[in-house]
């Protein structure tokens, strides 16, 4: 374990959290084997953590539309543009697992423009990064390019909303100097067997 602090702000004791939040975090830690540091860092403000988790789940876990791997790819690309170490490392691990590709997260984080992407993914990330960095310049031509790449209006909203939400998340993680859990660095690194 690292001797570096998890956050530059106080950490709450999970035992002191409201039962609903404690239950949600326990489900995540049971699945992953650890409590993601972002929850420890945000837990000293339970109402904000609850709102954060609710909106995260509404965007990232909703059925239909973008795949879960596409959603994570958006997070990694925009978090890299925002220089958010926590989100690049944590969501890079999730992207490797969901895409079943040990290379893609590093490629997207370093330079998504050079990554091994499909034309659809490239169009998606161009829009997501524009939302992250120049949302005021988005216009009908951006939506037309996404429609030409095969995205529905609902999916275009998802791309923009995920990018915008993680812009906020990136800024909170950077403000609080939240460190990624060391376990994230190794997750999904070994090639996964093909699904039967």
Image: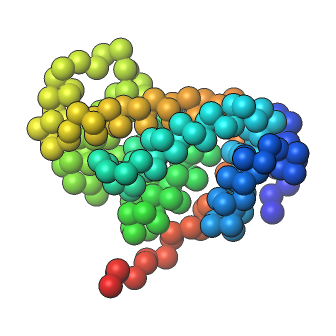
Is 39 on the left-hand or right-hand side of 16? left
Q: Does the rendering let one see residue 80?
A: no
Residue 126 in the image, given as x and y percentages of width and height: 29, 36
Residue 30 in the image, given as x and y percentages of width and height: 68, 67
As drawn, the residue found furthest toward the top would be: 136
Compare residues 41 and 84 and report the one nearer the observer.
Answer: 41
Residue 132 vertical placement versus 91 (above, below): above
Residue 23 vertical placement versus 161 (above, below): below
As drawn, the residue found furthest toward the left would be: 148
The residue under the point 44% across, 68% down is: 102
- Image quadrant where residue 192 sits: bottom left
The residue under the point 20% across, 39% down is: 152
- Image quadrant where residue 195 sits: bottom left
Residue 39 in the image, given as x and y percentages of width and height: 71, 46
The residue under the point 22% across, 54% down is: 118
Q: How was the colour assigned to the protein in this rendering? A: rainbow
Compare residues 74 and 109 and report the one nearer the observer.
Answer: 74
Compare residues 119 and 67 and report the one nearer the observer.
Answer: 67
Residue 26 vertical placement versus 194 (above, below): above
The residue under the point 37% across, 21% down is: 134
Q: Does the rendering let one see residue 161?
A: yes
Q: Quadrant of the C terminus?
A: bottom left
As drawn, the residue found furthest toward the bottom would be: 196
Q: Quadrant of the N terminus?
A: bottom right
Q: Tell how many labels.
A: 0
Residue 4 vertical placement versus 148 (above, below): below
Residue 122 in the image, given as x and y percentages of width and height: 25, 45
């Amino acid at each position: 374990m690292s001797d570096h602090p998890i956050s530059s702000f106080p950490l709450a004791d999970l035992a002191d959290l409201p039962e609903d939040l404690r239950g949600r975090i326990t489900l995540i830690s049971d699945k992953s084997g650890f409590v993601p540091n972002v929850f420890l860092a945000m837990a000293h403000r339970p109402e904000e953590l609850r709102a954060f988790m609710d909106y995260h789940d509404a965007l990232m876990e909703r059925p239909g539309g973008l795949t879960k791997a596409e959603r994570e790819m958006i997070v990694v690309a925009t978090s890299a543009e925002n220089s958010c170490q926590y989100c690049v490392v944590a969501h890079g691990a999730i992207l490797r697992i969901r895409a079943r590709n040990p290379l893609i997260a590093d490629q997207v984080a370093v330079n998504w423009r050079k990554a091994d992407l499909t034309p659809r993914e490239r169009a998606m990330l161009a829009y997501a990064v524009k939302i992250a960095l120049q949302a005021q310049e988005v216009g009908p031509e951006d939506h037309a390019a996404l429609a030409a790449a095969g995205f529905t209006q609902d999916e275009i909203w998802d791309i923009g909303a995920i990018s915008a939400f993680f812009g906020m998340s990136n800024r909170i993680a950077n403000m609080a100097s939240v460190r990624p859990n060391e376990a994230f660095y190794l997750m999904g690194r070994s090639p996964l067997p093909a699904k039967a």
